[in-house]
Amino acid sequence: MRLHRAGAEFYAYKITTTPPVAPTDWELSIDGGTTWADAQADGDYSVWLIAGPDYPGPGDNGGAEPAFTATDNTDVLVRLIDSPETVIWDAPQITIWS
């Protein structure tokens, strides 16, 4: 995901499992697993609002509260809430741009 320094965007990740797991049954971390945020659902996608380090940008009132603020290019971890040992280590990275 490419994220502008002063922006906020939804990190959307579609996870297919057998048996199926609801999109809201996942949580995400961008700090190596120290803190986690529960997913919201957007159809079949698990989504989290992620802000850039300069959010809100000039003329922006902020709006919704992000789950995380990415301060640099960031590796993402996703895990199953009810089974935290089930971790997805290769989720797409967040890349900050200006």
Image (tube, helix red, strand yellow):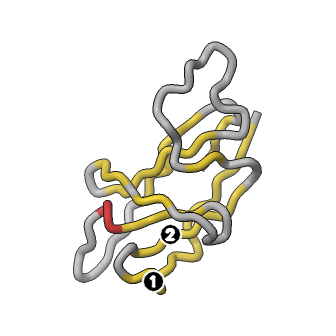
The quarter of the rendered structure image containing the C terminus is: top right
Q: Is residue 89 above or below residue 39?
A: below
Q: Within 10 Å of the Cα at label 2, are there few (<14), some (14-19), or many (20+) other Cα atoms?
A: many
Mark 2 and mark 1 lie on one chain; the one further toward the N terminus is: 2
Which residue is depicted at the point 62% across and 32% down? 7
Image side of residue 46 versus residue 73, left or right: left
Q: Which residue occupies the extreme bottom position in the image?
A: 85
User: To which quarter of the image does residue 6 belong?
Assistant: top right
Q: In x, y percent, where is residue 39?
A: 39, 57
Find disc 1 in the rendering and name its residue. Answer: 86
Image side of residue 34 versus residue 97, left or right: left
Which residue is depicted at the point 40% across and 75% down? 80
User: To which quarter of the image does residue 34 belong?
Assistant: bottom right
Query: Quick check: marks 2 and 1 in contact, CB under 8 Å?
Result: no
Find disc 2 in the rendering and name its residue. Answer: 78
Which residue is depicted at the point 33% across and 71% down? 16
Could you say which disc has been placed on residue 53 in the image?
A: none
Q: In x, y percent, where is residue 1?
A: 59, 50
Q: Which residue occupies the extreme top position in the image?
A: 59
Q: Amino acid at mark 1?
A: Thr
Q: 26 or 34, which lies in front? A: 34
Q: Within 10 Å of the Cα at label 1, are there few (<14), some (14-19), or many (20+) other Cα atoms?
A: few
Q: 2 or 83, which lies in front? A: 83
Q: Disc 2 and disc 1: Cα gap in Å?
A: 8 Å
Q: Secondary structure at mark 1?
A: strand
Q: Secondary structure at mark 2?
A: strand
Q: In x, y percent, where is residue 68?
A: 58, 49
